[in-house]
């Protein structure tokens, strides 16, 4: 029987999971290529034989997505499967048009078909857009579970940007584990706060193995989602976070609308930074597509670690990279902190950008004053350091969740900003308590 030839279109995460669950040992299909985009330095690699299984003894080549039309024809692909997240609905259909025009089918895989079933209760935290507040919500839930006497382990959506065969299962319990696994800035942003809070974090590439490892030391597994993707584990409670600073996006981005429709609880974050009419719009949109979920409102509270030096000082603002790049946010927590604590002039980060950081500003032309904390390689971290040090200002206000002082040598003081959710009612706590009573 002829095997159907598949190209998986991805960004080093969901694409690998879909392959592992649906195709790795399936003799009806032949995955002839992965394509990669969105994240720097992730194309032109091999999905290794250690992960690809007996049907792929040489592994599977990963190409840049720009080569997709040529690959479809060269490799005689029958079907292309979209397997990455936080794309506008319009962008998804443009990709579908490219694939169809080249003679292949275009498919979206249902999240449920790739969800692994855990032996332990699972709480999943997802979002309608990158940067809506998943990790702060996960931090809130994990601390609440601990206060209730429940041991939880956090499993983070994949970010395998290094040597894949060395990243099959990663366990982070100490800050030095970030160095052990050569974590990028993006990975540190998501793992470091959980580790500091005293929780074990798992990540990697093979989420079947990751889940089974996490289950051995947890009463509850928490899925901490990435971008606006769906969970890889079947949740017993799905919390989806929405962002009124991007009102309307909850209905126009994939797969964010999907996870909003699937949610058991919808949390509208950043109420204190948003317009009332935008909060109302998001609430109305969410209720239209999901009548059964409870809707909870929350503020996002920013906390600088050295607020006294902000007032009146000229500042360079450093923000979480994914949030203001492919996440599309016009500003982040550093901007909020600068305003709340009375910073002086905000310098234009773009003027000082060098190397790969300059390339990021060219790719995301709407960026201007905020500096995305890009750090996917040693060179990029060095370019970030040079950009910071070139900036003509008094201080740096950094809202990347990892401590920037540990990664670069800055020639000016860095104020580190953290941000946490503050629910505006007792509903979130009540739902978690009900979950514990029922499931644990």
Image (tube, rainbow, N blue to C red):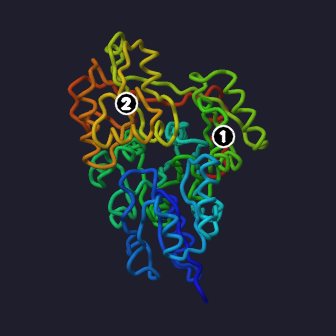
Q: How many marks?
A: 2
Tell me which numbered mark, 1 or 2, is placed earlier along the sequence: 1
Q: Residues within 10 Å of mark 2 (few under 14, many from 20)?
A: many
Q: Is residue 436 visible?
A: no
Residue 253 higher or lower than 213, as above or below: above
Residue corresponding to mark 1: 250
Where in the figure is residue 58, as x and y percent of width and height?
38, 79
Query: In the visual, does 31 lie left or right of 49?
Result: right
Q: Secondary structure at mark 1?
A: helix
Residue 154 shows in the view: yes
State which quadrant residue 360 falls in: top left
Question: Is 282 placed left or right of 182 in the picture?
Answer: right
Q: Secondary structure at mark 2?
A: strand
Residue 16 percent coordinates (x, y)? 48, 64
Q: Nearer the viewer, residue 315 or 65?
A: 65
Task: Give the residue drawn at x 37%, y 32%.
Answer: 371
Quarter in which the N terminus is drawn: bottom right
Q: Which residue is mark 2?
A: 318
């Amino acid at each position: 029987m002829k095997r159907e030839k598949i190209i998986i279109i991805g960004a080093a995460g969901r694409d690998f999971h879909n392959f592992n669950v649906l195709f790795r040992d399936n003799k009806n299909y032949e995955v002839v290529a992965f394509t990669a985009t969105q994240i720097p330095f992730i194309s032109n690699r091999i999905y290794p034989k250690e992960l690809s299984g007996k049907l792929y003894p040489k592994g599977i080549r990963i190409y840049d997505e720009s080569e997709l039309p040529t690959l479809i024809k060269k490799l005689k692909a029958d079907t292309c499967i979209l397997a990455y997240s936080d794309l506008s609905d319009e962008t998804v259909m443009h990709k579908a048009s490219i694939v169809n025009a080249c003679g292949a089918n275009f498919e979206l895989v249902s999240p449920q078909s790739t969800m692994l079933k855990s032996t332990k209760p699972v709480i999943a935290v997802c979002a309608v857009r990158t940067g809506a507040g998943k990790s702060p919500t996960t931090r809130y839930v994990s601390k609440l579970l601990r206060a209730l006497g429940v041991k939880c382990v956090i499993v983070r959506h994949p970010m395998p940007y290094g040597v894949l065969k060395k990243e099959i299962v990663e366990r982070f319990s100490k800050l030095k584990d970030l160095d052990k696994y050569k974590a990028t800035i993006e990975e540190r942003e998501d793992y470091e706060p959980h580790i500091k809070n005293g929780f074990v974090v798992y990540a990697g590439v093979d989420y079947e193995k990751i889940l089974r490892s996490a289950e051995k030391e947890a009463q509850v597994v928490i899925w901490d989602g990435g971008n606006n993707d769906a969970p890889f584990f079947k949740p017993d409670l799905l919390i989806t976070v929405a962002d009124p600073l991007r009102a309307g996006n909850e209905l126009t981005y994939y797969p964010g609308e999907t996870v909003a429709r699937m949610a058991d609880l919808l949390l509208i974050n950043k109420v204190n930074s948003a317009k009332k009419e935008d909060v109302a719009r998001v609430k109305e949109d969410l209720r239209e597509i999901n009548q059964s979920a409870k809707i909870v409102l929350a503020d996002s509270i920013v906390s600088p670690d050295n607020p006294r030096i902000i007032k009146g000082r000229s500042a360079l603002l450093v923000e979480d990279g994914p949030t203001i790049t492919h996440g599309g946010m016009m500003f982040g927590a550093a901007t909020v902190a600068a305003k709340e604590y009375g910073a002086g002039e905000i310098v234009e980060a773009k003027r000082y950008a060098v190397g790969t950081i300059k390339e990021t500003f060219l790719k995301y032309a709407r960026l201007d004053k905020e500096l995305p904390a890009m750090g996917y390689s040693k060179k990029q971290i060095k370019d970030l350091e040079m950009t910071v040090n070139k900036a003509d200002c008094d201080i740096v206000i950094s809202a990347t969740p990892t401590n920037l002082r540990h990664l670069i040598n800055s020639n000016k003081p860095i104020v580190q900003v953290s941000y946490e959710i503050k629910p505006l009612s007792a509903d979130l706590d009540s739902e978690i308590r009900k979950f514990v009573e029922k499931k644990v």
